[in-house]
Image: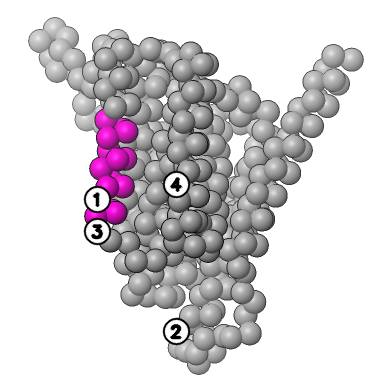
Amino acid sequence: MDIDLWVWLVTIGVTTGVLLFDVVIIGRRPHEPSMREVGVALAFYIGLAVVFGVGVWYFAGQQYGAEFFAGWLTEYSLSIDNLFIFIVIMGKLAVPREYQQSALMVGIVIALILRGIFIAVGAAAIHNFSWVFYIFGAFLIYTAVHLAREAGDDDEDGGYDEPRVVTWVRKRFPVTDDWHGVKLFAIENGKRLATPMLIVILSLGMTDLLFALDSIPAIYGLTQEAYLVFTANVFALMGLRQLYFLIGDLLKRLVYLSYGLAFLLFFIGVKLVVEALHTNELPFVNGGEPIEWAPEIPIWVSLGVIVLTLVVTAVASLLKDRADSRKATT
């Protein structure tokens, strides 16, 4: 997939414009968004992603179109799981509802920057070292097993531990207990203090960085095109803020979501290892020669597995929630 420089520049320019518009609108009037406001914005972002994917399908071919949709759905699914942690962070830090979307917006901007760096590093590594697929695959399989084991954990904090960077900031800089709107620093009694908003943004940013360690290898297991990796991440993150407010209560009902995501990560991890076998260069594996008999998993199979897993996970979760509700009322 040969992407001209002007296409990259236009894509980054449009992305930046949309984010700046969002930041300006929110910055002018911090508030808790209404369901109508959130629903319209989320529908717009999802529609934009679908139109973009159809455009890729039409102009670049079915293969790349399917790769984009597979990557976007995977990133979006992982983002939904990430919302659990965001809800925990907002709750633990007692963030007022009217300031939550401002914090989320800044956190998303930080995530885009960090993921952009990860995408560039990942693309360079894949281009120069094909064996990196072994590492990506093994890491995703390990993450899948770890996620499945934690799926049954009833800890209300969701296993969240404050990032070390945030703990370091708390120790090194005095933090006021008072909220000063969306300001990161404030003057109290002649002293410059960090506000709780700074702690929130740092927590969200560092959490997004950890999530990127899973999501970037996962999407590279579906496509090696850096442009598709970047755009899939952009569209997934664009609707994350709206999704937070729209389905906050619904997230608690998706009890099997972690199991579904664990299966997807395991599947993609295996796919990465299989692809590594096809391009094998490691001297201690098959004498440094590619393993031709290794089964190939086409993108159509990957897309089907992703969609089916998400549908089964959602339906099973809602059926269990309905059954639990009936038991509670009897």
Prevalent SS, magenta region: helix
Residue 321 screen position, x and y as percent? 76, 27
- Where is mark 4, residue-wise? 52
Please state if 54 lies on the left or on the right of 198 as rendered: right
Mark 3 to mark 2: distance in Å?
A: 31 Å
| Residue 80 shown in magenta | no
Q: Secondary structure at mark 1?
A: helix
Please state if 237 lies on the left or on the right of 321 as rendered: left
Residue 307 screen position, x and y as percent? 65, 49
- Where is mark 2, residue-wise? 281
**Extreme residue toward the bottom, this view:** 287
From this view, report whether residue 98 is shown above or below residue 7. above
From this view, report whether residue 55 is shown above or below residue 64. above
Q: Amino acid at mark 2?
A: Glu
- Where is mark 1, residue-wise? 9
Q: Which mark is residue 5?
A: 3
Q: Nearer the viewer, mark 4 or mark 2?
A: 4
Residues in magenta, as a range: 5-20
Which is nearer the N-term, disc 3 or disc 2?
A: 3
Please state if 265 lies on the left or on the right of 133 as rendered: right
> Quarter holding the N terminus?
bottom left
